[in-house]
Image (tube, rainbow, N blue to C red):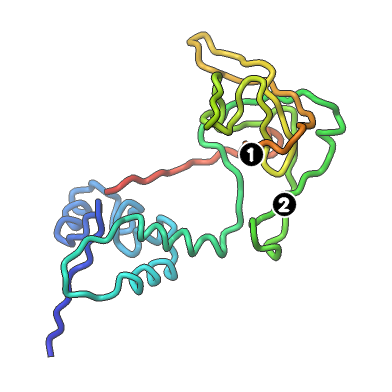
Amino acid sequence: KVFEMSRLNISYTVLSKRKLTKLVTSNFVRGWDDPRMPSISGLRRRGYSAAAINAFCRDVGVTRNENFIEYNRLQHFARLDLEDRAPRRMAVKEPLEVTLVGDDAVFAATYEAPNHPTKADFGTRPLTLSRKVYIDASDFREVDDASFFGLAPGKWVRLRYCVTIKCTSVQKAPDGTVSGVTCEVGACDSDPKGKLHWVSDADAVQCELRDYDHL
């Protein structure tokens, strides 16, 4: 018996073996395991686990009708897989230096952050609060508005799992861009809605972030 089925098509993704071979042989990519490639080895290098790929294939199923699967459906199963087993860490993509002013006791205290928001068995990790920390530049605005929950002059926010801070002054580079801010560490009357990812100058490490777009 011969069983015919439609090919798997994913939006914004090249799946033709002839075209993918051309990309490899013409050195547009670094090989079949290039993280930009939609091959199994490429997906694995990009961070997709075998369980995530298999779950996606089971969900799509086998059909005889030609169709296109949305790319975010594949990403959905990667997120589901990572949600259960990945410990959490904080990172800032575009670091903005924040100088903290406050009592010495605040910086001598020990702060703990959960390694997973819902799984207590993942344990906790210590956070070091130094007088210089970094937040993402997109989490600061010179002009505040009601829909923005980040940091702004005169506004209280919380450094995630840590203290509340209020922006008291802004430093600018010669070209007019914001180069840093100074914040007061204190107690806010209510828990602010804004909770920012941050890294401390004391134990932060530089890293390379690779954000792959569609091939």
Residue indicated by mark 2? 125
Left/right placement of residue 179 relative to residue 18 reads right
Q: Quadrant of residue 17?
A: bottom left
Identify the residue at horizontal 62%, vertical 16% (top origin): 170
Identify the residue at horizontal 74%, vertical 32% (top origin): 130
Tell me residue 112's x, y (percent). 75, 48
As drawn, 51 above or below 83:
below
Residue indicated by mark 1? 195
Tell me residue 60's x, y (percent). 30, 70
Q: Quadrant of residue 86?
A: bottom right
* Label 1: element kind: strand
Of 30 and 11, nearer the camera is 11
Left/right placement of residue 152 relative to residue 1 reads right
Amino acid carrying label 1: it is Lys
Q: How far is disc 1 from disc 2 in space, using C-alphas?
A: 18 Å
Of 136 and 166, nearer the camera is 166
Q: Residue furthest bottom?
A: 1
* Label 2: element kind: strand
Tell me residue 203's x, y (percent). 69, 39
